[in-house]
Image (spheres, grey):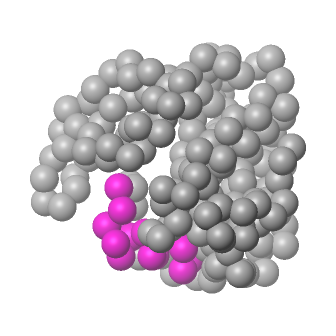
Amino acid sequence: MGLGIKNFQGYKIEIRPLGRGDLRRPEKFQEFINSLIKEEAMILMRTKKTRKEELEWLKRELGDIKSGQKVVLVAEDKGQIVGSTRITLGKEREDHIGTFGISIRSGYRGIGLGKYLMAEIIKLAKKTFGKKIKIVLLNVFDGNKPAMSLYKKMGFKPVAKLPKRIQYRDKLISETVMMLDV
């Protein structure tokens, strides 16, 4: 895989898998997610997280990785988390579906980092899950035009619209489900 230090419009960003060493620094992940919550990014979380909550989240993520249910990549610039992405494999009758998620810090969007992370996490999912994974699904807030554009460029197709699914800035907005055959 093409991980390591990559240049994105002058930013030298390290792309790496989430690992056990991250348990020693949950505050980095806490600061990252809280920065997204503070800016009211189009993510599902809206309540700031504590260090303890992030540590528990990291433990769950690492457990899912160890059990072969999830792949996770992290992007860091000078020790600061600036992006993360994951694909979680479904269970039982949905074990052919990977659910995709990505978050990029403000100031690091629009430089190609999201596209690179998407391509790499899909490669990692195919390598890790093998022939088991056949579909990758994602959900995107309606109105998130940059994300929608990126997903379409990466081959995702809209397959459903869920009306009034998300509470965002005191409004109920729709969410679009997109799918990629892998």
Q: Position of residue 160 (x, y in %)?
A: 33, 21
Instruction: Identify which residue is drawn at 38% across, 18% down.
Output: 159
Residue 128 coordinates in the image, percent (x, y): 83, 34
| Residue at 59% in and 69% down | 82
Examine the rendered structure and indicate whether residue 100 appears above or below residue 32: above
Between 140 and 45, which is closer to the camera in this rendering? 140
> How many numbered discs, if any?
0
Q: Please name whichever residue, 112 or 92, is drawn nearer the observer in this view of the structure.
A: 112
Image quarter for residue 83?
bottom right
Quadrant where the image shows the N terminus:
top right
Q: Residue at x 32, y 43 (%)?
A: 145
Q: Which residues are magenta?
A: 30-42
Q: Is residue 10 above or below residue 44?
A: below
Residue at image coords 50%, 25%: 156
From what the image shows, is residue 111 above or below residue 53? Answer: above
- Image quadrant assignment for residue 96: top right
In magenta segment, residue 122: no
Furthest residue to the front? 10
Asked whether, in this view, residue 55 is left or right of residue 50, the answer is: right
The kind of secondary structure the magenta stretch mainly shows is: helix
Side (left or right) of 20 relative to 87: right
Does the magenta portion include 40? Answer: yes
Examine the rendering and report whether any part of residue 105 can be seen.
yes
Task: Tell me, yes or no, if residue 129 can be seen here.
Answer: no
Q: Quadrant of the C terminus?
A: top right
Q: Is residue 52 left or right of 146 when viewed as pictured?
A: right
Q: Is residue 159 above or below residue 20?
A: above
> Can you give x and y, in whole percent of width and height, for residue 14 in the image?
76, 66
